[in-house]
Amino acid sequence: MTSSDLPPRIPLLSKTRYTAGLQCVKRLYLELYARELATPPGPGQESLFSSGTAAGILAQQLYPGGVLVAEDYLHHREATVRTKELLQDSTVSALYEAAFTEDDIRIRADILVRGPAGSWEIVEVKSATSVKDQYIDDVAVQLHVLARAGVQVTRASVAFINNQYVYAGGSPVVGDLFSVEDVTEFAQERLGEVPTRLAEMRTALAAGHEPSIDIGAHCSKPYTCQFVAYCRRNEPDWPIDGLPGIRATRVDELRAAGYRSLSTLPDSIPLNAMQQRARDAVQSQRPWISSDLTRVLGQMTPPIHFVDFETVAPWLPRWPGTRPYQTFPFQWSDHVVQADGTLEHAEFLADGDGDPRRAFATSIIAQLRGAATLVVYTGYERTQLTALRDAFPDLRSALEAVLTIPQFDLHPVVRNGYYHPEFRGSFSLKAVLPVMVPELAYTDLTIQHGDVASLQFQQLWDRDLDESARRQLRADLLAYCERDTLAMVRIVEALHGIVGRTELRG
């Protein structure tokens, strides 16, 4: 199919739209013709977008002396004119954000580097820490467009973050911060598929109706599609993917065999023990309770500390001696159940824009002195405590003492001891709490997820933030982390009630 064959109503494609179409042509169709059906991106997704943009700008320093095609996406035609001028100027060693429109595809190439004898290298910049398969498709469609534009590309590369780079302070050493990998061979192989893929997408777009494509593993691979909620609107109340731990490919197999609802899934379908519990709970509409739950809950000895950490992992290191995406704990909350059943609460939130780890470590050491049981939800806190131990030799013995406190992980306790149909296949705290303690659901909080807490904490690094906004951010962060640990207390209370034991009091 050539551009002259296309109905004029088909919008131009782009590298983003092309890769969306590779994932699912229905996604591409909805993105172009029914954008209002999309779920708006959350703060985590927006953060990824902004990180990618910032990384792209910084990576330009890998090829100094280049020229930025500054016209924005609203002035793409002007940007293509400017790009053609720069391509003809032999004094321009590199172009940043070069713009092209060919074969009804509009692209901005992150970096084009002039080579010998009129050749060019294209460099795709990513804020990830490795080259992923989907990046090759990004490069391949750009090679398709550049070939149509008469640009001779002899090398294709992906620049990505080197997470082994150690920041020494001052301006980052960009040549060490980024790794650049030659992907020419892979991109050329993928380039041969581009015309066929484009024809398939354009046929679907020209059909005048939404493609009929069922939900499946492709909905979240390589990216979570923003139309998942729309495409799942006709799913039954208890869909097959509500089985705990089920592989996406197995879900596709069951759907293909005609099974979509747990409420009608027959016993003849082989499931593991946990999945059988979930199916039986749905079909009976009664929770499953382990006979061993009473014994497991009895392992907690007061004073019992219910602890939760919040962390931040900036892609660009901020503090000397640290690496990209290194994790830094900046906040903790601790609800303590004493031997007499009384409930106490303590908390810590780092202040300022310095490395929060030492203040975090010293405060948690003091807080957990005398604890008999440490209750967490997954083993994340132990991982962070171990990292702190290794980072601060002078605190090593004190942190070793914290690590020897008997740790009670509530996640496997719930997973192995109790299943309610409304868990819907998940044992995360956010899934369990609204079912077991509905009055404590996170809906009344400004911050409702850990990734948002991390982003909000990074806002506190802005020295221009006014004091009122700063106080509100801190209050929101403290409220969120406090809810996490109170949630664990109340879940344990609920579990004690379920098995008929005396409840913890608070």
Image (cartoon, rainbow, N blue to C red):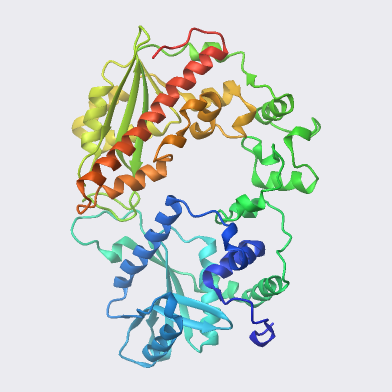
Residue 137 position, x and y percent, is 55, 68
Q: Is residue 179 above or below residue 236?
A: below
Disc tally is 0
Using the image as rendered, state which of residue 43 and residue 301 is in the foreground: 43
Question: Is 433 on the left or on the right of 98, as rendered?
Answer: right
Q: Residue at x 39, y 40 (%)?
A: 446
Res 279 quadrant in image? top right
Q: Residue at x 21, y 30 (%)?
A: 362
**Can residue 498 be seen at all in this image of the molecule?**
yes
Q: Is residue 165 above or below residue 333?
A: below
Q: Is residue 239 above or below residue 17?
A: above
Q: Residue at x 58, y 56 (%)?
A: 225
Identify the image quadrant of the N terminus: bottom right
Res 293 quadrant in image? top right
Identify the image quadrant of the C terminus: top left
Residue 429 position, x and y percent, is 49, 31
Residue 10 position, x and y percent, is 63, 76
Q: Is residue 315 above or below residue 336?
A: below
Residue 319 position, x and y percent, is 22, 50
Using the image as rendered, state which of residue 423 and residue 39 is in the foreground: 39
**Can residue 129 be seen at all in this image of the molecule?**
no
Question: Is 95 on the left or on the right of 293, as rendered?
Answer: left
